[in-house]
């Protein structure tokens, strides 16, 4: 039987980028370690300009997005789910009604959609850019000006080393400084100064001494480069001279609707003022003389990321991110690793019941499909990060950190899955705003809570002759008879744990042989 999950020669992979200005679909064929384009679709949806005052996507923006994704879905209808990855960026990071849209969007597209963090977006952009550049030892600065965010990345070879994502983009800036379409010198100057001021927070990180070559990717950079190419400038490089010429053309036109520039697409006219202002601000702030136009983009990074997941030596970005997080918050790694080991042992004991059960209230995320045990392991390693803020209700602090941090390799939904486990690793269970019919989550949660109890003395417990089993919605924990006298505190904590589960639709039964 053919395994459609394996990426081999001639495999088709597809990436969907739900950007603030445009939605894009890139289909590529995997051939000997590289991706060859098969098809590319782009539609201007401009959701970034349709957030209301309460930061909700307007109904018309939702409708435009769903219609576009339905068309993409028709193209992708025969693709295995494992060969398609769809991500949303800044607009949906901001939108308060994001979950409502994502639920409808998944149905329209036919595939899961992740809302990725800014640093994950930056990493994927660098993946796309670096894969399409000649390999060298040069240190690279990559800049991508999108519709509502701008990403900065420092990297070398295929590795992104430093990333930042700032909430400034062509759509947002155009709405703020050119809402009336007036492209005056005064408006442009105000927008440029504001952009430079906003981006100044990262200027020291990306100063000239940190890189050899500066690259511009996708979005505004691509649009500006195309116009400059038609005007006789080097189409592969944006210079100060070219930017000054384009700026003068905008002022000469006076309004966006009167712009008549070869290479400037109609859908770009409304946002060129904001994008150009940000680009000029970056040139001034970082003292750039030129910006090399890169061919790679976020969607290419997605394709190569899928390819890497199936390679013999995948890059463990998630593990590296968790290691940095736990180091940053001073986690006692010996204890955390003990909890991890015990939790995984309990999970393994009852996980076969998950494979036999047909009940599954939601489609598993990409990480849950490919690394089912690692989510629990990462939660165990992170369960005490909140103690760096306060030991009082540290689980709440830890959950807050995970919900509000940005980690390479993780989508926001995946970080929230980790935060729920950390929030629930001890204490009352009803406080969790979680689906208690989700047996995958419950199994992880129980395994983590039991591990924390057995490791309460901060030593590795001896778990010989301890068994955990499951039947329906009941977990059965069997202890040796000697445990009552040898470990009275552990037994007391287990009694409390039994009471905690009685207030849910699940049960824990602890017993010792006669």
Image (cartoon, helix red, strand yellow):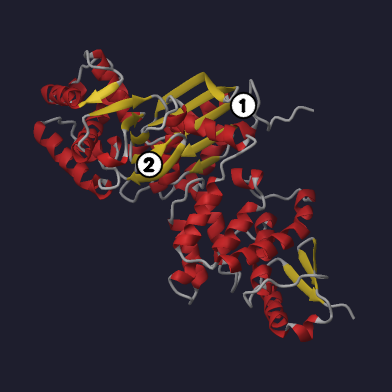
Q: Is residue 432 above or below residue 364?
A: below
Q: Which residue is mark 2?
A: 58
Taking the spot 49% from the left edge, 27% from the top edge, the residue there is 25
Q: 439 or 52, which is in the foreground?
A: 439
- Residue 71, image x, y percentages: 51, 25
Residue 385, how many percent across, how many down? Answer: 50, 66
Q: Where is the N terminus found, in terms of image quarters?
A: top right
Residues at badges 1 and 2 in contact (C-beta under 8 Å)?
no
Choose top left, top right, bottom left or bottom right for residue 455: bottom right
| Left or right of 16 on screen, residue 435 | right
Report the residue that reaches farthest toward the front.
137
What residue does disc 1 label?
Answer: 77
Quadrant position of residue 453:
bottom right
Q: Mark 1 falls on what kind of element?
A: loop
Q: Would residue 50 be seen by someone viewing this image from the given angle?
A: no
Residue 36 appears in view: yes
Q: Nearer the viewer, mark 1 or mark 2?
A: 1
- Asked if 212 appears above or below 330 in the picture, the reply is above
């Amino acid at each position: 039987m053919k395994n459609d999950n394996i990426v081999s020669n001639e495999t088709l992979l597809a990436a969907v980028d739900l950007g603030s200005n445009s939605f894009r679909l890139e289909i590529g064929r995997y051939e000997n370690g590289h991706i060859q384009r098969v098809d590319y679709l782009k539609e201007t949806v401009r959701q970034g300009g349709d957030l209301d005052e309460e930061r909700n996507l307007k109904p018309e923006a939702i409708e435009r997005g769903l219609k576009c994704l339905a068309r993409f879905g028709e193209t992708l209808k025969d693709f295995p789910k494992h060969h398609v990855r769809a991500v949303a960026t800044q607009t949906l990071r901001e939108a308060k009604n994001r979950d409502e849209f994502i639920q409808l969007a998944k149905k329209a597209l036919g595939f899961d959609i992740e809302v990725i963090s800014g640093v994950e977006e930056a990493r994927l952009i660098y993946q796309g850019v670096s894969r399409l550049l000649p390999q060298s030892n040069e240190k690279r600065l990559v800049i991508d000006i999108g519709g509502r965010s701008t990403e900065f990345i420092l990297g070398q070879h295929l590795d992104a080393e430093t990333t930042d994502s700032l909430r400034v983009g062509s759509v947002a800036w155009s709405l703020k400084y050119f809402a009336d379409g007036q492209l005056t010198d005064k408006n442009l100057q105000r927008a440029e100064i504001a952009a430079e001021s906003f981006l100044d927070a990262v200027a020291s990180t990306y100063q000239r001494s940190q890189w050899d070559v500066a690259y511009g990717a996708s979005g505004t950079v691509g649009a500006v480069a195309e116009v400059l190419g038609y005007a006789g400038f080097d189409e592969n490089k944006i210079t100060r001279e070219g930017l000054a010429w384009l700026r003068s053309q905008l002022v000469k036109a006076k309004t966006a609707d009167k712009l008549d520039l070869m290479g400037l697409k109609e859908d770009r006219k409304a946002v060129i003022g904001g994008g150009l202002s940000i680009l000029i601000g970056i040139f001034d702030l970082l003292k750039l003389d030129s910006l090399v136009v890169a061919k790679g983009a976020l969607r290419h990074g997605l394709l190569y990321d899928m390819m890497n997941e199936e390679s013999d030596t995948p890059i463990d970005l998630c593990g590296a991110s968790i290691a940095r997080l736990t180091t940053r918050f001073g986690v006692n790694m010996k204890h955390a690793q003990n909890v991890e080991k015990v939790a995984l042992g309990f999970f393994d004991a009852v996980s076969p019941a998950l494979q036999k059960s047909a009940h599954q209230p939601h489609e598993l995320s990409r990480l849950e499909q490919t690394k089912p045990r690692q989510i629990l392991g990462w939660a165990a390693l992170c369960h005490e990060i909140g103690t760096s803020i306060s030991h009082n209700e540290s689980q709440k602090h830890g959950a807050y950190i995970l919900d509000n941090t940005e980690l390479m390799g993780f989508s926001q939904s995946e970080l929230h899955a980790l935060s729920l486990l950390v929030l629930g690793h001890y204490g009352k269970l009803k406080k969790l705003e979680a689906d208690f019919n989700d047996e995958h989550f419950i199994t992880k949660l129980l395994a983590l809570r039991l591990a924390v109890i057995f490791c309460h003395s901060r030593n590795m417990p001896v778990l010989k002759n301890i068994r955990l089993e499951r039947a329906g919605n009941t977990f059965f924990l069997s202890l040796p008879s000697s445990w009552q006298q040898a470990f009275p505190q552990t037994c007391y904590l287990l009694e409390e744990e039994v009471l905690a589960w009685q207030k849910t639709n699940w049960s824990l039964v602890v017993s010792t042989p006669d």
